[in-house]
Amino acid sequence: MGCGASTPEDAQNEIAAGGQQKPTDYNYMCKLLLLGDSGVGKSALMMRFADGSFKGSFMSTVGIDFKMKTVTIDGKRVKIQIWDTAGQERFRTITKTYYRGANGYILVYDVTNQESFDRVKYWLNEIKKNGNENVYKTIVGNKADLSDQRAVKFEDGENFSKEVNIPFIETSAKDGLNVEGLFTTMTQKFVKFAASQN
Ligand code: GTP
């Protein structure tokens, strides 16, 4: 669990109540939601970014999990809340309720699993139905370290990204490839947007 609140609900309540954190602790709060099929590496990406760790074992997320990390962008302290949704179908009713408040969506597939790539369309549709369509998104092909098991070419990801007009990146939660860049870029986009609203 992340710092601050002990459950996602507590975190939401904290924000609603203005936060238990002193206002000076951060300038912006950025909520990023991880979406994608079970096993693609959503939790692993969150752990890599927030804790700098990687676990090889697979413990499927139950409902929703979250972690926080505070970074400095353009001289502003930004508290990033990463919400890790369960990919399993049976948790869909719970996870849907977290779409609405997101400041960014990270749509993850596994480059060794063609079906998970084909299902990105499904996840995009879920955002359309349950979330904010005009919020910044990124499509992520994870497990790029598994080159000998690759089923989805880099070009396939790139072509789909052009088709739907959403940025694309390949990552490895295992060796850290592009993970920092992914979360930092998403947060930068949010800060730019938030600053333009002031
Ligand atoms: P759900 O919680 O069921 O939705 O799954 P998830 O998308 O959160 O997947 P999770 O992060 O639990 O990872 C599933 C398995 O893939 C675990 O055994 C991870 O160790 C492994 N994994 C995740 N990312 C990578 C990666 O970049 N490279 C490799 N080689 N394995 C990875």
Image (cartoon, helix red, strand yellow):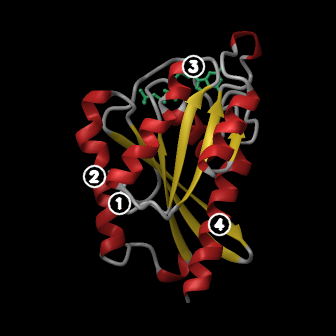
Q: To which quarter of the image does residue 64 belong?
A: top left
- The secondary structure type at the circle numbered 1 is loop
Q: Residues within 10 Å of mark 2 (few under 14, many from 20)?
A: few
> Decide: marks 2, 1 in contact (CB < 8 A)?
yes
- The secondary structure type at the circle numbered 3 is helix
Q: Measure how far apart labels 3 and 2 are at the Cα level.
A: 28 Å
Identify which residue is drawn at 52% across, 27% down. Answer: 118
Identify which residue is drawn at 66% across, 25% down. Answer: 143
Q: To which quarter of the image does residue 9 belong?
A: bottom left
Identify which residue is drawn at 75% across, 29% down. Answer: 154
Q: Which mark is residue 189?
A: 4
Left/right placement of residue 74 relative to residue 114 reads right
Identify the residue under disc 2: 97
Q: Measure how far apart labels 2 and 1 are at the Cα level.
A: 7 Å
Identify which residue is drawn at 35% across, 60% down. Answer: 100
Identify the residue under disc 1: 100
Identify the residue under disc 3: 114
Q: Residues within 10 Å of mark 3 (few under 14, many from 20)?
A: some
> Decide: marks 3, 2 in contact (CB < 8 A)?
no
Left/right placement of residue 183 relative to residue 6 reads right
